[in-house]
Amino acid sequence: MVPVALDPVRARQLRCQGSDAGRTLTDVTLEAIGAGGATVSEVVIEVSEGRLGGLVSLVRDGDPDVVACTAEEAVALAVRGAVKMYATDAALAHASARPAKPARHGGAGGPETVH
């Protein structure tokens, strides 16, 4: 597991698709990708310049493209787009090298953890 910090409000937004809170930028982004004839095929959490980041794989007419983003954006696209999310070995090593936070209510990562 690679912990990607999300504030509690953002975690609730991702969990509550179609809520009264309105559409999120992630929802609009996914709609725009689809309107352009592309689909998000997968999301990869990686390490770049010592920080977690994301790579989003898009496919349009069989042609692949990869777009870099923050780890938080990658998680949001994976959760809201219901696509597979992976982590590189470097991201897993990065996560295990970080000091563990004490467990809080709601699981190992607290109530804002998206599983």
Image (cartoon, rainbow, N blue to C red):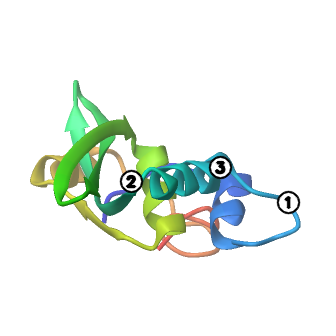
- Give the farthest residue toward the top: 49
Of the pair 109 and 83, the residue shown nearer to us: 83
Query: How far apart are the alpha carbons under marks 1 and 3?
Result: 16 Å
Labels 2, 1: front one: 1
State the residue in front, 61 or 97: 61
Q: Amino acid at mark 1?
A: Ala
What residue lies at 16% left-to-right and 50% top-to-bottom? 93
Residue 24 in the image: state x and y as whole percent: 70, 52
Residue 2 at x, y percent in the picture: 32, 58
Give the Cα separation between the discs numbered 2 and 1: 33 Å
- Neighbor class of circle 2 (other Cα within 10 Å; few <14, some 14-19, many 20+) is few
Location of the N terminus by quadrant is bottom left
Label located before the other in sequence (2 or 3):
3
**Residue placed under numbered mark 2 in the picture:** 100
Q: Which-is-in-front pick, marks 1 and 3?
A: 1
Residue 83 disc label:
none
What residue is pinned by disc 1? Answer: 21
Between 87 and 32, which is closer to the camera in this rendering?
Answer: 32
Residue 94 lies, in percent from the top left, at: 22, 45
Kind of residue sitting beneath label 3: Asp
Quadrant position of residue 52: top left
Q: Is residue 1 left or right of residue 27?
A: left
Helix, strand or loop status at disc 1: loop
Q: Quadrant of residue 19?
A: bottom right
Residue at image coords 48%, 46%: 72
Crowding at dot 3, Cα within 10 Å, few <14 / some 14-19 / many 20+, comes out as few
Graded by Cα atoms within 10 Å as few (under 14), some (14 to 19) or many (20 or more), the crowding at tag 1 reads few
* Left or right side of 40 for 57: left
Q: Is residue 24 above or below residue 109?
A: above
